């Protein structure tokens, strides 16, 4: 009897390791080892086809840092990530607040707004591409605006923003639904007592509701960060990196190089991407730990 | 007087809210309208205004897309990948997050936690090319391989979401179970997992949407002619196929299955997505 | 909400039912077609298929990247199966054929029968890594005319067989020229006059597709001024592109043509440009014979004619459009050979070339389609050159050159022609010597 109990207690010590270690190993293989493998290729001249390759040191990195396209890639990534992260959350929260008011038809609106989320990003990108080419150009001709006439996805200035806005169009529904759930989960009695204490709507929103929906905020931040830094299908479908490289995302740049038999160069781009985001990630984690935020 | 003003104000604010909501609905629905409309048109219709109704409503574009083949296999592949990748993702991540969340005071588990979540901020595309090379080593450049890779790359966000949730589940629960002589696995499945169901529901919806719509991974992993729906769509947009009415028919067809599922499970999907957002 | 759901559900299920019935219908018609085509293949005297036994069996993949002939090829496969019932051919149409195939090769696999064109860098790299089968001793190599077959020769051995050649230039909507009483563009002066005349009437003269930079015009023009050998030596790093005598003129002519672009040309990719041309929104389109069926598919009444771009030496840009290569490591070499033999046989080649308005690479093929006759005559007279981009350095140079042409147009709009030309020449030099990546 006692032995059995002891066994149980032991199993509480052992089993967690038995579960976590395999998962750590899976991730080791598919992420860390793969990343190291990519790092090795980045120092070669491998074209992806031949069975042999030579080590060429930092050659690919030198080329990359001399490349106009890397600069454009970084610029686009910043624009895209910031717009997607900020606008999706702001818009999602704004609409959630509206829907949280006791009005008729909330469910209908919520159902309609969710439509874009169930569609594949690529399809959406193609559709917006057509809207741009068929409709925006027509609009431009009608009102005589030169930028619109040529189409917004074809404008080196506007294309990055338009691509990001297209992504926001797809991403806001999930964000909104999560915020809405958070808002609806705020207990009515807390709000009531705040009102009795004379708090106005603004105060209630910032001082009570926002702290209460921290879980929703966390989910949305993580989810939208992921969307913001992995842009690929949306670019592929709208501009394919153009015009003139203005909408190269890291993934797009890599994929183009990869498909044109410059695999080693693509790996170097991947490594630069990993380093940039790795540094940001580490800083973020250190910062959050220093603030003792539960991460 | 004051009453009237406030009533007027309330009317205005209500009006404003509806205006914003209707405007958003139009922005959301407009591309759908255009897609379906274009799918019914013939190339000759392109001479007319793009938003005009087709000269003749017919289904020939849809018929042609289906005749060309590829739609049903792609739908089947997408369904298989989504189902298995989601099941695998949830099975592994829930129990993993449970143990990570409960043992974070131990060095190894704390380390493991960061081991996974660093991946939130590092896009998986960093390892995209090596994965293709590795996929060959393990014979994984196929549908099962794609499923495995989806699962392997699902750790960061799910661990982050679920571990956070597990910490909110009172520890007394497992301590009671432990004292009762209940093993960790049984405790997890019988007691903890049901308590985690809100975040599991959220993760479920996010995973299904993510896997179903994923394009990058299948693009590089599937090479034996197998296609998922996004790849099917991608192939419709080739350099040489010029009939974009046909392409829109293909887009419409690719939208139908998720739309059907969404319409019938709308309540559960939104509830599920929402569940994790409320403190457990 | 409930009602909306119901209505939508009914609509969607209706769609499904329709699509199912549609599926059945098309299946029937397909079989019908297969039956009639059989006769066409069997009424020649020479037995092209005697060298390969009818009972060869195998399960092979047919890998190709010409989606516009996907349906056509399914019919061909049906015909083939009537002769060789034991061979299963799986057609695999890939958008990025070269890159997916390359990923496969990275994984140690290739395909069985590959439709591609030689002299291209992708083909070359697969050849160098030993993925392509030596078919020198097969009878079908002799079906092709020697000069074209030579493109598949490496070190005295043949690694494939060509079936059809393409040609690219100015595709004209003859009806629009006649209607507006404008002369067809037989030389540079008539070409420019036609552009001006259309422009004056408010019609887009040339449907340029500058969005994805996959604009044929600058590529073809380059070829009329700079020879393939010169580009090869540029790619080898022996000289700069800007040192080639004709390059600057090629850029000038490209700029002249681009100056006729309408505003939305920069938003227009190949698909939309072609659709617009088929719908008579532009009078000319710069591309190749492979677009003919797509165009007539959209607008069956359109009357087409094709002329070379009248720049430089005025030669015709032409390359192998359809060539078949067999994977060296195929599991079913005999089945692959039988299939390629079938595809390259005179009856099949004749059928293909007439269907696609292509120029035959197979001997004794009579072509009745006259739309590309101007081009075919010039090619027969030896006045042709291969696609210049095939000689570009391996890797991303071609893609970058595409982008550079989009950039050229944007610079023309923003900075004026002089500055645009200067930038473009600098950029092309960088792309060719590999300093721009």
Image: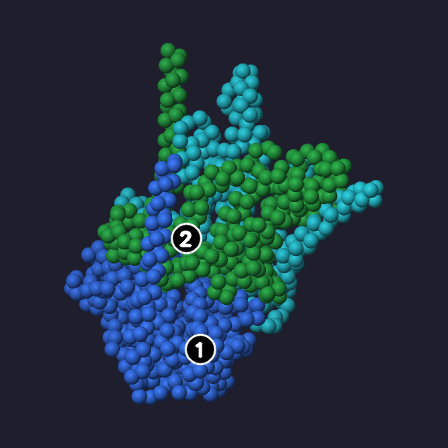
Chain colours: A cyan, B green, C blue
Q: Left or right: B182 with respect to B122?
A: right
What residue sits right under mark 2 in the picture? B254
Of the pair A7 and C389, the residue shown nearer to us: A7
Residue B120 makes an appearance in the image:
no
Q: Quadrant of residue C183?
A: bottom left
| Mark 1 residue element | loop
Badge 2 sits on which subunit? B
Q: Left or right: B157 with respect to B115?
A: left
Query: Relative to C106, does residue C137 appear above or below in the rendering?
Result: below
Badge 1 sits on which subunit? C
Question: Are labels 1 and 2 on one chain?
Answer: no
Query: Relative to A98, does residue C224 appear above or below in the rendering?
Result: below
What residue sits right under mark 1 in the picture? C86
At horizontal 47% and vertical 60% (from top left) the residue drawn is B227
Q: Is the residue under label 2 in contact with that under label 1 (CB below 8 Å)?
A: no
At horizontal 39% and vertical 20% (from top left) the residue drawn is B9
Q: Position of residue C204 (x, y in %)?
A: 25, 58
Residue A175 tag number: none
């Amino acid at each position: 009897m006692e032995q059995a109990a002891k066994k149980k207690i032991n199993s509480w010590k052992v089993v967690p390791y038995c579960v976590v270690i395999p998962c750590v190993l899976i991730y080791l293989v598919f992420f860390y080892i793969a990343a190291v493998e990519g790092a090795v290729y980045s120092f070669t001249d491998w074209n992806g086809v031949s069975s042999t390759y030579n080590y060429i040191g930092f050659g690919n990195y030198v080329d990359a840092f001399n490349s106009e396209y890397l600069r454009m890639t970084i610029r686009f990534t910043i624009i895209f990530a910031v717009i997607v992260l900020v606008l999706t959350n702001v818009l999602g929260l704004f609409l959630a607040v509206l829907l949280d008011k006791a009005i008729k038809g909330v469910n209908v609106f919520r159902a309609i707004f969710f439509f874009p989320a169930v569609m594949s990003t690529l399809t959406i990108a193609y559709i917006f591409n057509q809207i741009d080419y068929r409709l925006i150009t027509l609009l431009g001709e009608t009102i005589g605006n030169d930028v619109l006439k040529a189409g917004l996805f074809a404008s080196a200035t506007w294309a990055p923003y338009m691509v990001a806005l297209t992504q926001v169009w797809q991403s806001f529904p999930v964000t909104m639904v999560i915020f809405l759930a958070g808002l609806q989960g705020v207990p009515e009695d807390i709000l009531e007592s705040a009102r009795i204490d004379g708090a106005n709507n603004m105060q209630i929103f910032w001082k009570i509701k926002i702290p209460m929906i921290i879980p929703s905020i966390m989910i949305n931040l993580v989810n939208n960060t992921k969307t913001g830094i992995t842009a690929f299908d949306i670019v592929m479908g709208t501009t394919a990196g153009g015009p003139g490289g203005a909408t190269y995302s890291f993934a797009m740049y890599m994929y183009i190089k990869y498909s044109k038999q410059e695999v080693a160069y693509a790996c170097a781009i991947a490594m630069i991407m990993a380093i940039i985001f790795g540094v940001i990630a580490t800083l973020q984690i250190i910062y959050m730990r220093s603030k003792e935020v539960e991460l | 007087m004051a009453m009237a003003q406030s009533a007027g104000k309330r009317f205005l604010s209500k009006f404003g809210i509806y205006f914003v909501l209707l405007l958003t609905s139009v922005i959301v629905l407009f591309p759908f309208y255009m897609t379906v409309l274009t799918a019914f048109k013939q190339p000759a219709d392109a001479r007319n205004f793009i938003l005009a109704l087709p000269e003749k409503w017919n289904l020939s574009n849809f018929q042609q897309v289906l005749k060309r083949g590829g739609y049903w296999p792609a739908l089947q592949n997408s369904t298989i990948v989504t189902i298995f990748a989601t099941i695998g993702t949830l099975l592994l991540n829930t129990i993993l997050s449970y143990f990570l969340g409960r043992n974070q005071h131990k060095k190894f588990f704390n380390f493991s936690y960061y081991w996974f979540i660093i991946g939130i901020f590092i896009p998986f595309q960093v390892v995209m090319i090596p994965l293709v090379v590795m996929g060959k080593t393990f014979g994984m450049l196929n549908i099962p391989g794609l499923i495995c890779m989806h699962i392997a790359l699902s750790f960061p966000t799910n661990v982050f979401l679920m571990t956070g949730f597990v910490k909110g589940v009172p520890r007394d629960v497992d301590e009671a179970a432990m004292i009762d002589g209940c093993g960790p696995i049984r405790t997890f499945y019988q007691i903890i997992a049901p308590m985690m169901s809100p975040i599991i529901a959220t993760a479920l919806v996010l995973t299904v949407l993510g896997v179903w719509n994923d394009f990058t991974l299948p693009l590089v992993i599937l090479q034996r002619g197998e296609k998922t729906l996004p790849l099917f769509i991608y192939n419709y947009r080739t350099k040489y196929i010029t009939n974009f009415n046909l392409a829109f028919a293909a887009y419409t067809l690719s939208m139908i299955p998720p739309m059907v599922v969404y319409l019938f499970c709308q309540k559960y999907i939104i509830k599920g997505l929402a569940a994790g957002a409320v403190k457990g | 909400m409930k009602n909306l759901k119901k209505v939508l559900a009914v609509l969607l299920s209706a769609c499904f039912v329709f699509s199912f019935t549609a599926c059945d219908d098309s299946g029937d018609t397909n079989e019908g077609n297969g039956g009639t085509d059989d006769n066409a293949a069997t009424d020649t005297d020479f037995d092209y298929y005697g060298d390969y036994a009818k009972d060869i069996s195998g399960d092979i993949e047919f890998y190709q990247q010409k989606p516009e002939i996907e349906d056509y090829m399914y019919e061909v496969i049906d015909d083939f199966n009537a002769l060789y019932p034991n061979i299963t051919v799986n057609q695999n149409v890939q958008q990025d054929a070269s890159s997916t195939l390359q990923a496969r090769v990275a994984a140690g696999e290739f395909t069985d029968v590959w439709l591609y064109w030689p002299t291209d860098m992708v083909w070359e790299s697969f050849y160098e890594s030993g993925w392509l089968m030596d078919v020198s001793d097969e009878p079908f190599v002799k079906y092709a005319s020697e000069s074209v077959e030579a493109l598949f020769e490496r070190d005295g051995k043949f690694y494939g067989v060509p079936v059809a050649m393409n040609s690219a230039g100015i595709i004209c909507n003859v009806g629009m020229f006649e209607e507006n009483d404008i002369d067809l563009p037989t030389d540079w002066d008539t070409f420019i006059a036609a552009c001006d005349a259309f422009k004056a009437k408010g019609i887009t003269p040339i449907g340029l597709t500058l969005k994805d930079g996959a604009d044929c015009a600058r590529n073809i023009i380059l070829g009329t001024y700079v020879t393939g050998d010169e580009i090869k030596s540029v790619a080898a790093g022996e000289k700069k592109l800007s040192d080639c005598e004709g390059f600057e003129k090629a850029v000038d002519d490209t700029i002249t043509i681009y100056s006729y672009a309408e505003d939305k040309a920069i938003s227009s990719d190949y698909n939309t440009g072609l659709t617009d041309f088929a719908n008579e929104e532009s009078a000319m389109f710069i591309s190749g014979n492979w677009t003919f069926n797509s165009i007539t598919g959209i607008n069956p009444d359109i009357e087409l004619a094709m002329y070379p771009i009248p720049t430089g030496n005025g030669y015709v840009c032409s390359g192998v459009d359809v060539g078949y290569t067999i994977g060296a490591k195929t599991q079913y070499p005999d089945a692959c050979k039988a299939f390629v033999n079938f595809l390259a046989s005179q009856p099949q080649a004749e059928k293909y070339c007439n269907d696609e308005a292509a120029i035959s690479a197979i001997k004794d093929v009579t072509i009745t389609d006259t739309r590309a006759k101007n081009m075919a005559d010039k090619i027969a007279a030896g006045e042709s050159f291969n696609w210049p981009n095939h000689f570009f350095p391996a890797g991303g140079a071609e893609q970058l050159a595409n982008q550079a042409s989009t950039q050229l147009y944007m610079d023309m709009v923003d900075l004026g022609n002089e500055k645009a030309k200067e930038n473009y020449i600098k950029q092309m030099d960088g792309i060719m010597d590999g300093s721009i990546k």
